[in-house]
Amino acid sequence: NRRIVLAARPHGEPNESHFRLEESRVPTPGAGEVLLANRYLSLDPYMRGRMSAAKSYAEPVAIGDTMVGATVADVVASNNSDFLPGDTVVGFGGWQDFAISDGKGLRKLDPAVAPVTTALGVLGMPGMTAYTGLLTIGAPKPGETVVVAAAAGPVGSLVGQIAKRQGARAVGIAGGPEKCAYLRDTLGFDAALDHRADDFADVLAAACPDGIDVYFENVGGAVFDAVLPLLNPFARIPVCGLVSGYSATDLPPGPDRIPLLMRAVLSKRLTLRGFIVWDFADQEAAFLRDVGGWLKEGAIVHREDIVDGLENAPTAFAGLLKGRNFGKLLVRIS
Ligand code: NDP
């Protein structure tokens, strides 16, 4: 059993040196447990938080422990009457070949309904994040302008497509011309902009002539700075992620801009609401029904970026935080 453990806590950007590949015996399931052979591992930005000791909404991974992560896995041995060998499930198998589970949090997958990898992306946690955050907090109305960054990723790409289904205008922000062309030509965004452009703030203003009604916050930083002056009265901001700052070691330099932000919150009567997808766990069935249905009809598009080999997970993960992925980042383990 190969497993990747957290070797050291990064100060700044993570790299290969913060992980270590270890070998151990394949574990044996105890009473009520199943043995899982992981097939696909999901790499997600939240894992940067788990590498830090800083207090957050979830416990950090301890040094020397296996990195956590969602996986699609096959049940290879079972002492649990709910699962049979040969079942394919989605659960939290971690960065390793084999995992033991007591069955809690495992969901069986039917490959006839959708390819099993979708359970880690468009029909999994990232998809549900887009669906719940946009519809419950953003609540876009026909004709409104919705802006989202990291728009070529699993969360942002679905935010834009659901915004369009609601009759809103979707403006996507992504790194580089290839991702921007994908947003416009394949996903149907009304406009797509590169956040690395020197004149990004001007280009964003030009792409939002009627201002911004919903800003789905995935990245923070310079993108939020450009968005803030364009927000309309009563704009809604689901605060989903702040990936531009996950590896920051300090607050950014410059004047304290909290008063500017708070003045905008007050005068424009903004709603900023942070959320973690599991706050909306009661919407999971509705999410699977709606997004599963749209996917089946071919009404929405999703994209996966699959890296081969567990040993390549650390490099792929470091790249995710810098936009080297193009689509939902997965590692094929076996
Ligand atoms: P993505 O696959 O979209 O990967 C993250 C992307 O962020 C990169 O590909 C990169 O794309 C972009 N990015 C990185 N740095 C910057 C920057 N400085 N400025 C602008 N964009 C940047 O990830 P996900 O779709 O999985 O996640 C998107 C966001 O949603 C993350 O912030 C994540 O933490 C959050 N999230 C929150 C959840 C919740 O429950 N609240 C649940 C799931 C995800 P590019 O090339 O376009 O720059």
Image (tube, rainbow, N blue to C red):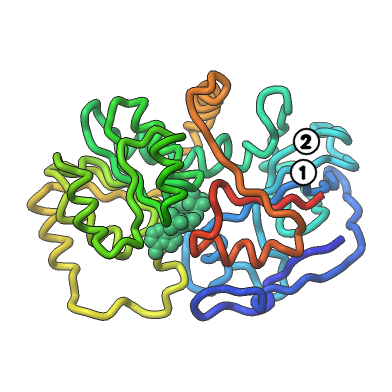
Q: Is residue 92 above or below residue 286?
A: below
Determine which residue is flagged by label 1.
73
Determine the residue positioned at 70% across, 35% down: 116
Where does residue 194 sit, x and y in percent of width and height? 35, 55
x, y percent for residue 299: 48, 23
Q: Is mark 2 within 8 Å of ligand 1?
A: no
> Which residue type carries mark 2?
Thr
Secondary structure beneath label 2: strand
From the viewer's perspective, is 322 left or right of 101?
A: left
List x then y, in percent, for residue 160. 38, 37
Mark 2: few/some/many CA within 10 Å (<14, 14-19, 20+): many
Q: Quadrant of residue 47?
A: bottom right
Percent x, y for residue 213? 21, 40
Q: Residue at x 17, y 61 (%)?
A: 261
Residue on which the image places disc 2 = 88
In percent of the image, x 46 and y 49: which residue is there?
A: 178
Q: Residue furthest top?
A: 297
> Amino acid under label 1?
Ala
- Which image quadrant for residue 257? bottom left
- From the viewer's perspective, is residue 98 above or below residue 190? below
For residue 221, above or below residue 273: below
- Image check: 228 left or right of 54? left
Q: Are marks 2 and 1 in contact (CB under 8 Å)?
A: yes
**Number of numbered tags placed on the structure image:** 2
> Callout 1: 10 Å neighbours few (<14), some, many (20+)?
many
